[in-house]
Amino acid sequence: MNLIFIRNRPVFAALAALVLSFSGVIARAQNSSPKREDRITIVGTVRDEQGTAVAGAAVRLIGKDVRYSLEVKSGPDGTFTLSISARGTYTLWAQKNGRRSNAVSSLVLAPGDKKQIELVMDPSSPSMEFDDQPNFSVAGVTDWNNTGIHGSDASQRTSEALVKETLSLKPAGATDSKAGPGAENFRDSEKELREQRERVKKLLASTETADAHRKLAELDERLGDPLEAVHEYERATQMDPSEQNYFEWGTELLLHRADQPAVEVFTKGTRSHRRSARILAGLGVALYAGGNSEEAARKLCEAADLNPADPAAYLFLGRIERAVPAVLPCSEEKLARFAKDQPENALANYYYGIVLWKRSRGMEQSGGVQQAEALLEKATAIDPKFGEAYLQLGIMHFAQGELEQAIRGYKKASEASPQLSEPHYRLGLAYRRMNEEAKAEQEFRVYEEMQKAETAALEKERRELRQFLIILKDQRPATPR
C-alpha cells in the first residue's frame, strides 16, 4: 500500500464567493447541475438517545470555509438525504423542539463523496434552550470513503483522548515529544535533533536498515514533519514487519487523523502479530476514531483477553462506553472482569458502574441500578477527587427523581474536579426542575463560560495536529520488502 500525503487546502473560495453573490446563503438546485458522479451525498438517520427515529427534525449542513448551507427535514422514519456540489469543510447537526444533536464538525467533503451519518439528539448540547431530560450522547459515523471523521464533538474528544493514551503504549522515548510536557525541551534541543537526523540520513545512505528508518521517523515527528515520519515508519515496516514497527506506523497515522489508513495498518499488524494486545488496542482506537464504535469495542475486548492483567484495553473500552448511548458488544463482560480483578481501581468500578446503569435504565425494580450506585460510591471512596464518578451518581439520582441527592452529587463533582463544566449544566437542570430559576440561570451561565474556554483549548490543540488528506494510490496491500 503506497500512501501519498498532501495538505488539505481550500481551493474554491473565490468561486464560492462568486456563486453566493447570486444565490445568497442557502444552496438550491442549480440549472446546470454537475455530473451525477461529482455530487456529494450524505444520507443518515436522526434518533433520540433511546435509539428511536426522530421525524421532522431540521437537519442543517453549514459550510465552515465555504458560504454554503442546506437544510432538510428528517422523514417519518428519521432518515434524511443531502446532496450538494460545493467541496469544503462543513458542520452537520439536527434540531427539533429545542433539542439538538451533537454536531458532526470538520466534515471534509469533496466531489463524489458519499457519507452515511447517524445523528443522536442530545439534550446536553443545547443551542438556545436547556432540556431537563437525562441523556447519553453519540453520533455514529460510517464513512464510505478513505478518510475517517468523528461523529460528534463528544465522541471526537473521546477519540482524541484515546489517541493520546495509545501513544503511551509506545516504548519509552518513542512518543511524540511535542505533544506533552517535553515541548520546552524540544525547542531547546531542536538544533541537536536536526544534527541527529542528518547523521541518521548519512548512515542510511551507506547502509539501509529498518532501525535507522524508524529512528529517522521518530526524529522527523519530533521536528514537526509528520509526513516524512509516516514514510519512514512505512519503510521500516517493509524492511522489518515487526510488532513494534507496525504499532508505531499505525500510531503515527492515527496521531495525525489518518484514521482509515491507521485501521489498515493495524489490521495488517494483527495478521502478522496475533498475540499483540497493543496492536489490537490501536486498531480499536482507530476504528472508534473512524466512527465504528461496535467493531472498536470488539477489538478492545480481544486485546483485553490477550492480556487480562493490563488495564489499557479496559480503560479504552470504558472511555468509549461512557461516550455512547447503548451498551457495546462484549464490554459488560470485560468491564465486569476488570472490576473483579482490580477491585481497588477506581476507574474499574466507575466504568462497570456506568455499564450497569445504562443496562438498567427504564427497568423497574432492577438490581442493576443499586449495583451501579454501589460501584460508583466505591469509586469515590477509593478516589475522593474522582469528579466524574460523583457526576454520574448525580445523574442517576436525577433520573430517579431524587433531586436533593442529585444536587449533592453535582456539587461534589464540581468540588472534586473544578475543571468539569457538566456539573454546572446538570445543576441548572435540577434547579429548574425545582423552580429555582435564578440558581438555574447562574449555573447555566457558568456552564456556557466554561464550555467556551474548553472549546477554545480543544480547537487550539486540534490546530496543532497537522491535518492529512490521504489519497490511496492503489488498493493492493503493502507487502514487506
Image (spheres, rainbow, N blue to C red):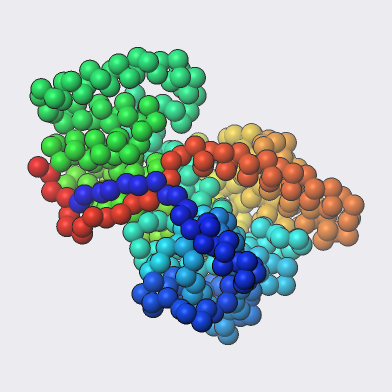
Of all residues, the one furthest to the bottom in this rendering is: 76
Q: Nearer the viewer, residue 463 or 407?
A: 463
The spot of residue 179 in percent (x, y) is 46, 31
Q: Nearer the viewer, residue 129 or 365?
A: 129
Side (left or right) of 73 relative to 320: right
Using the rendered view, name the quadrant where residue 125 is placed.
Answer: bottom right
The spot of residue 148 in percent (x, y) is 40, 56
Side (left or right) of 158 relative to 70: left
Give the mark count. Answer: 0
Residue plotted at (42% across, 76% down): 34
Q: Is residue 297 above or below residue 385?
A: below
Q: Is residue 368 above or below residue 35?
A: above
Residue plotted at (22% across, 46% down): 269
Residue plotted at (73% across, 51% down): 425
Q: Nearer the viewer, residue 398 or 252?
A: 252
Q: Nearer the viewer, residue 100 or 107?
A: 107
Residue plotted at (78% across, 44% down): 446
Side (left or right) of 100 relative to 287: right
The spot of residue 238 in percent (x, y) is 15, 41
The spot of residue 262 in percent (x, y) is 32, 49
Q: Check the picture and name the quadrant holding the C terminus.
A: top left
